[in-house]
Image: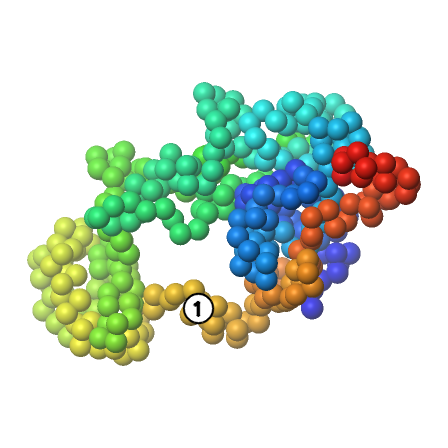
Amino acid sequence: MTGRPADLPLSGITVVSLEQAVAAPFATRQLADLGARVIKVERPGDGDFARRYDTTVHGESSYFVWLNRSKESITLDLKTDAGREVLERLLADADVFVQNLAPGAAARLGLAPEALAERFPRLIAAGLSGYGTSGPWAGRKAYDLLVQCQAGLVSLTGNEHGTARAGISVADIAGGMYLYSGILTALFTRATTGTARPVEVSLFEALAEWMHQPAYYTRFGGVQPPRIGTRHATIAPYGAFTAADGKDVLFSIQNEREWAALCERFLERPELVTDPRFATGSDRVAHRAELDALVAERFTELDSAAVGRILDDAGIANAGVNDMAEFLDHPVLDARDRWRDVRLPGGTEVPALLPPADLGGIRPRMDAVPGVGEHTERILTELGYDTAAVAEMRAAHAI
């Protein structure tokens, strides 16, 4: 079961979103999870281009299904007078306006924060850009992997043979999370002061925040952390090793107590505890190759289950390196009842994970993923348009 919007923390909040792709839809979906009414404005016809990233979820895009449950979809052509008029009516009753349009597009449509503040003083204008709305790169397009490159993440990801992108859209996710938290903060500020403050997030600055540790390491150490696959750049031993049954198990040594336990109980080499090559954390990093060889040799003597048991008994954190099928069947998600069914536009239901933040006594909303323009006529009727006006707009391709 899912929570009714009226029972949820953001009940009564209306969000109008000119959104596409990943980052902004991720932010607004989380608002919808908490009960906000999210009206997603899409292009007539195909709608949000993320609908066509793939067709793997019963004909729907895996990205779109993930990012757009519990929303309402209206199609508007904002190049038409009628489409812009409908948007103005929507914004007049909205609490939050979200957009991640191409650079400069919001301003050309009269949707920049300053212009909106004049027309709708209580509206929180939230914008997401690639590199900010000012500065030398304000007009530059930005997509997730481009931002991963610019923020230096790709230079840290991979191994000695080359760089790699992060396996998920980490820049988009970072941007969406900061946009979400920024909107929540702006709603709180408006509730306590009466002032609606705009929110601006850039993908580059969101990911730049996450890059602080390697940036400090590079600035003050004189060299950036190396690319070493699943190994940790500044801690050893910390990484994945292959057990006798072929499965990789990752473990981490965080302190001297754990180092001693590893030597005595897992490696069965107590003399290594005081070996000068491995006496401190820095020593172990400096002699990583020798240490990893000792660990790898021990792994060849044990299957992955035995590795896990011994490390658990020694109080050393470890985890099997799961593939996606193993993740989907993870016993923690099952035992904690984290899956809920969500309906797709065609009526098929698929499992979706509950939001990770549990609020006591609150059941998050897990409603259907909308079809393109599924709620257009209902929303227009709410705004006061009669059947003839709706038909006229449809004939003019304004909706």
Q: Is residue 145 visible?
A: yes
In the displayed orientation, state which residue is furthest to the front. Answer: 395
Q: Nearer the viewer, residue 150 or 58?
A: 58
In the displayed orientation, state which residue is furthest to the top. Answer: 136
Residue drawn 64% across the image and 23% down it: 107
Residue drawn 86% across the image and 44% down it: 382
Relative to residue 8, is residue 211 depicted above or below? above
Judge from the rendering whether residue 38 lies leftward or rightward of residue 93; answer left or right.
left
Residue drawn 51% across the image and 24% down it: 139
Q: Nearer the viewer, residue 320 or 140?
A: 140
The percent coordinates of residue 57 (x first, y second) are 56, 60
Q: Residues within 10 Å of mark 1 (few under 14, many from 20)?
A: few
Quarter of the figure that contains the N terminus = bottom right
Q: Nearer the viewer, residue 308 or 268?
A: 308
Q: How is the image coloured?
A: rainbow
**Disc 1 designates what residue?**
325
Residue drawn 22% across the image and 57% down it: 236
The percent coordinates of residue 264 (x first, y second) are 17, 73
For numbered disc 1, what is the local secondary structure? Answer: helix
The percent coordinates of residue 300 (x first, y second) are 18, 73
Quarter of the figure that contains the C terminus = top right
Q: Is residue 365 visible?
A: no
The percent coordinates of residue 44 (x first, y second) are 70, 40
Q: Quadrant of residue 215?
A: top left
Which amino acid is tagged 1? Ala
